[in-house]
Image (tube, rainbow, N blue to C red):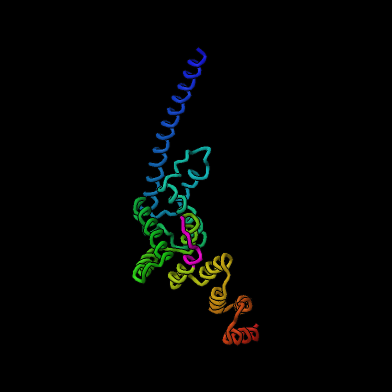
Amino acid sequence: MKISNKWDKFIQECELEFNKLEEDKSYCFTIYEKIIQHFNLCLKTKQYKSLLDLIDYFTKPDSYPNFHLTAEMRRTFVLLNILTIELKHKKIPFVSTANDFNSFQEQYILTVFAMRRLELMLSDDSMNEAQSYLLSIPFSMYAARFILEHEIFENFQKLYWNLYICMKSAWSVTDKIQWLVCILEKSPSDEILLEIASLYLEFPHYPKAYEYLTQIQKPSSQIIELISSIKELI
């Protein structure tokens, strides 16, 4: 009799749990539809700042279910992080060339695919296609960093550098320096130090250029001469 009571109780608990899951599922679909509708409206009216109204759906787990664990919602949350900082720094939003939620999802996937090509470096044609695609969309340094941090890549150092080479003509000097400093923190090298110093010379900002040049471990005679010339200027 006791065994029967325990079994009945277990069945009741399971039924309650399944009912709750069904309610959560229904709620998830409702929220999901609201997000897509809001997303499409913002893109149609180019009110990109209004997309940030969706952040609460992702940052308040007690109020909303974990629907954002789906791939589509995870990409959406990455976009909201990208958009927040792009708007702050007055960059063209990554999502500004997308027409609706689905086209944004497609753009995000193609961007990751292009980045993987740059990481793997399978062929010159593959690299050129990846570069052409990334230069054809609003791909800010902030978009690159957030996608790098939230997707799975194996060779960060190679990808960071290849992205820099790929986007060198499109990013501002300040963005390029910030990007290279990230690489330097992960993997210091004379090549990166020289590249940062060269960018500071474009400003020109001689003290900063001098600071990075003097960190080079094995300077060539040309670099030593450049250091001497800059020292006279500061």
Q: Is residue 96 magenta?
A: no
Compared across the picture, whether 218 is left or right of 88 comes to: right
Task: Specify the quadrant of the image occupied by residue 226.
Answer: bottom right
Residue 45's place in the image compared with 168, above or below, is: above
Instruction: Give yes or no for residue 157 being in the magenta stretch.
Output: yes
Q: Between residues 105 and 184, which one lies in front from this camera angle?
A: 184
- Percent position (x, y) of residue 6? 50, 18
Do we see residue 87 in this rendering?
no
Q: Where does the magenta region start and end?
A: 152-160
Q: Is residue 17 above or below residue 96?
A: above
> Could you tell me which residue is drawn at 62 percent across and 83 percent down?
227
Between residue 58 and residue 165, name the one nearer to us.
Answer: 165
Specify the farthest residue to the top: 1
Instruction: Point out the image quarter for the C terminus.
Output: bottom right
**Nearer the observer, 30 or 126:** 126
Residue 194, percent across and down?
A: 56, 77
Query: Is residue 120 at least partly visible in the picture?
Result: yes
| Image point (46%, 55%), residue name | 152
Give the x, y percent position of residue 161: 48, 69
- Which quarter of the figure has residue 228? bottom right
Image coordinates for residue 130, horizontal then vertical, percent:
37, 66
* Residue at 48% over, 67% down: 158
> Which residue is found at the position 39% from the left and 38% from the top?
29
> Total marks drawn?
0
Residue 120 drawn above or below residue 169 = above
